[in-house]
Image (cartoon, grey):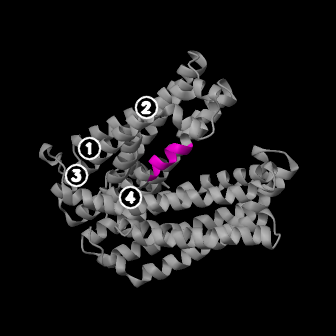
Amino acid sequence: MRKFFDLLMQAIRGEEQNYTEVNINRAIFLLSVPMILEMVGESLFAIVDAFFVARYVGIEGVATVGLTESVLTLIYSVAIGLSMAATAIVARRVGEGNKKEAGLAMAQVIIMSVIFGIIVGILGFVFAEDILRLMGGDQHLIDKGANFTQIIFASSPSIILLYTLSGALRGAGDASTAMRSVILANFINIGMDFLLIPVMGMGVEGAAIATTIGRTIGVIYQLYAIFKGNGNMQIEKSQFAPNAEVMKSLISIGAGGTGQFIIQSASWIFLTRILSSFGSDVVAGYTIAIRIIVFTILPSWGMSNAASTLVGQNLGAGKPERAEASVWRVALYNMIFLLFVGIVFSVFAKEFISIFNNDPKVVDVGIVCLQIICLGYVFFGYGMVIGQALNGAGDTRTPTIMNLICFWAIEIPLAYIFAKTLNWGPSGVFWSIAIAESILAVIGIFVFRMGRWKTKQV
């Protein structure tokens, strides 16, 4: 137990940053722990803001947040894509032992993030009212919520940098700094939400200011840690001039990562649209079940990110077989974890759903959704890890094509056929999710075994 605690603290402190030599199990643990905590921290932003706005501002405030966040999803998709690219490129340079090139990649990530953030920030600030109107907000909501939208969009550089710098730090093996930055940002956000909303009565604008301050301080911490010195990167002032070759790689890899996120998000919108035809009770039960599932997937996503870093660094070090072995090991651990979670959810589905809502119809739908989707958890465990492993190798195009096939060509048509044509109702949609995710995992395993990712140059 003492050894486990010591290893846990080492993972949180981030003492080890090059994972091409240490024991694979040790490398997985040291990377996964801070990445899991980072994912949990990132999810808290939306939860905390929603809590304070719902409790102290009201329905209009919640609607303003919801409409603004729905548009910001597009920005998040670009930030996530750039983050994947940053992880792949920085990890590869670190694995090669090329500290100067790793530093150059980090510098280019910062330049691109700032430029993109400024452009989005200006457009969002100027057209805030039009954005809310386009999303269906009435004039009263626009008058009350435009300031929130302006502040949030003005903070776009911080939003994007928090994602992209975290990705670059993970690629460098410094997952603990990425974790600490997100946790710090969350603590600031929670404190500022409490101060600005219930205490000072600033309403929904207070939530925007709190989030902006929290994320900005998180970014400042990241930049401080980067420029203070990372053992795997050598950053110089001269590197902060646009480098066409590195930027081209970032855009090429990032485009695939962005595409993956957009494809997944769009598929969920279509599924929700089908479910909405069966009534609000069905949508409520589905929403609750999905939120429960997403929360448990966070640790899995952390482990998947660990696989991405391990692939990038080991390929850079000229150790493709070690990279492959690392992925299969992470996938196995992820499968075991999700298998356990799936069993627990299947047995105690009613208890979990009832925590959020006691309406019998909502609970019944939530139970069915949770139990059916959990049947695919074993496949989810492998599919998630392999997708991120391919991204870590710099091959974001292949997972994008896989997502397009499984989510748009299989999941959405199956959902409609099962639910409407075959009259399975809401459960038909749930079955389509389990089937599509399982097929995605099978295709991913087949593609990964082919080994073309081992020769990918970034």
Q: Residue 381 sits in which quadrant?
A: bottom right
In this picture, is 378 found above or below 220?
below
Q: Nearer the viewer, mark 4 or mark 3?
A: 4
> Mark 4 = which residue?
84
In this picture, is 120 found above or below 24?
above
Q: CA distance from mark 1 to mark 4?
A: 18 Å
Instruction: Give the number of the disc on residue 231.
Output: 3
Instruction: Give the number of the disc on residue 226.
Output: 1
75 in the magenta segment: yes
> Mark 2 = which residue?
126
Pinpoint residue 377: horizontal percent, then vertical percent: 63, 68
Residue farthest toward the top in the current orientation of the protein: 200
Determine whether the residue tagged by mark 1 lies in a helix, strand or loop: helix
Q: Main secondary structure of the magenta part?
A: helix
Q: CA distance from mark 2 to mark 1?
A: 33 Å
Question: What amino acid does circle 2 point to?
Answer: Val
Mark with earlier residue (1, 4): 4
